[in-house]
């Protein structure tokens, strides 16, 4: 029997093949910028809002949800503060990747978050908390299509936050979701995000072993549907050694970026979620060795005693593309 989690994964290639517009948009997005660090910024503080501009984070998430008191007056004040900030600092924010985490669809604050904030042209991505199924995404997409219909460039990246067992069970269908309003007006998925602190029913340990299955499934599903995979927050924000360990672990699993809750975490995340010098060198050597092999009408080559073949070219090119985008040095190898 095929579960609802497994079924969409089996059809991932067919989905992307049948939806070239979605696939093309994702490819272009991944080539133009890096999305390593996702910094949450409380909208309850003018100081933190202004400080966010110089944080160096690839994606800045202005948070209207957990970092703001649930009191209606506080939610209203935070939304108003963020709207004014987006207007007053628009010139400084123009070249940054501005995202917003709205309140979830079950709250009375969701609609105004969409109408007042997500409707702003500076907002490129929307983080959606507590997504359990595609029903949630359909409801949100309808609201987005209305709020952004007057924008010249209404396209919005939609990033569902997976933070429940139900969300995990429906992960494949969530990752394959498309807006009935169209990807331009209703938004299109760009990544899957894991919220470990909200994920219940487990006992947390420093080894993260209890989260290995869940995190691996998110990475596999994201890759199957051409999405980015964003790893959990490191709550020990004062211990950068623990953060580095988590970053190394996440990158090895296949995550493309990580959430941050403090500006001090950004530099470590940015430095970790890029290829190492050794990886860049090997990628360059693979490209060169395979070029020589193809010129000699061979399909494989020997590189330092190990066989390399055509599938490795794709991965090597990806490593070099990320390195180039990050401004890292790519060695020039002699012909």
Image (cartoon, grey):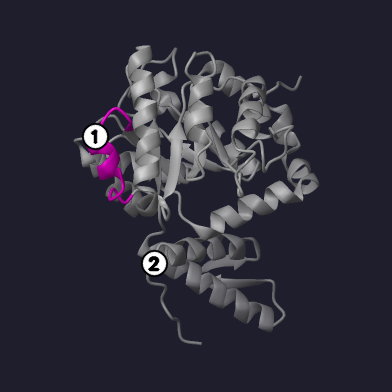
Q: Measured along the vertical axis of the image, is residue 300 above or below residue 100?
A: below
Q: Secondary structure at mark 1?
A: loop
What is the x, y in percent for residue 110? 51, 21
Q: Measured along the vertical axis of the image, is residue 215 above or below residue 36?
A: above
Residue under pointer 1: 237
Q: CA distance from mark 2 to mark 1?
A: 27 Å
Q: Is residue 119 something that shows in the picture?
A: yes
User: Residue shown at 47%/39% (left/top)?
Assistant: 230
Q: Secondary structure at mark 2?
A: loop
In the image, farthest residue toward the left: 238
Magenta highlight on residue 295: no
In this orientation, which residue lies closer to the viewer: 208 or 34?
34
User: Residue shown at 26%/31% (left/top)?
Assistant: 45
In this orientation, which residue lies closer to the viewer: 93 or 57?
93
What is the x, y in percent for residue 317? 55, 65
Q: Quadrant of the N terminus?
A: top right
Mark 1, residues whose alpha carbon is within 10 Å: few (<14), some, or many (≥20)? some
User: Residue shown at 61%/81% (left/top)?
Assistant: 292
Magenta highlight on residue 43: yes
Residues at discs 2 and 1 in contact (Cβ within 8 Å): no
The tag earlier along the polypeptide, 2 or 1, is 1
Q: Measured along the vertical axis of the image, is residue 19 above or below residue 118?
A: below
Residue under pointer 2: 327
Identify the magenta region. 42-56
Q: Quadrant of residue 95?
A: bottom left
What is the x, y in percent for residue 288? 55, 77
């Amino acid at each position: 029997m095929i579960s609802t989690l497994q079924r969409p994964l089996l059809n991932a290639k067919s989905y992307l093949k049948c939806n070239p517009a979605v696939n093309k948009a994702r490819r272009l997005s991944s080539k133009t910028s890096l999305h390593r660090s996702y910094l949450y910024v409380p909208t309850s503080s003018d100081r933190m809002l202004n400080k966010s501009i110089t944080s160096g984070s690839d994606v800045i998430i202005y948070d209207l949800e957990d970092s703001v008191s649930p009191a209606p007056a506080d939610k209203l004040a935070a939304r108003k503060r963020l709207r004014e900030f987006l207007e007053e600092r628009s010139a400084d924010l123009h070249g940054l990747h501005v995202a917003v985490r709205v309140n979830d669809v079950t709250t009375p604050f969701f609609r105004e978050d969409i109408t007042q904030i997500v409707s702003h042209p500076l907002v490129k991505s929307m983080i959606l908390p507590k997504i359990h199924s595609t029903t949630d995404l359909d409801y949100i997409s309808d609201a987005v299509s209305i709020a952004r219909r007057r924008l010249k460039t209404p396209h919005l990246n939609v990033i569902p936050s997976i933070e429940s067992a139900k969300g995990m069970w429906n992960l494949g269908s969530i990752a394959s979701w498309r807006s009935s309003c169209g990807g331009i007006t209703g938004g299109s998925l760009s990544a899957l995000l894991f919220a470990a602190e909200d994920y219940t029913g487990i006992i947390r340990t420093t080894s993260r072993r209890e989260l290995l299955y869940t995190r691996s499934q998110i990475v596999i599903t994201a890759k199957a549907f051409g999405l980015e995979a964003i790893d959990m927050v490191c709550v020990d924000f004062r211990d950068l050694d623990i953060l580095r360990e988590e970053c190394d672990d996440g990158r090895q699993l296949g995550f493309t970026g990580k959430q941050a809750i403090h500006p001090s975490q950004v530099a470590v995340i940015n430095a970790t979620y890029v290829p190492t010098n050794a990886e860049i060198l090997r990628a360059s050597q693979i490209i060169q060795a395979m070029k020589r092999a193809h010129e000699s009408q061979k399909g494989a080559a020997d590189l330092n005693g190990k066989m390399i073949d055509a599938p490795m070219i794709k991965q090597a090119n990806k490593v070099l593309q990320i390195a180039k985008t990050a401004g890292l040095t790519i060695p020039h190898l002699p012909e």
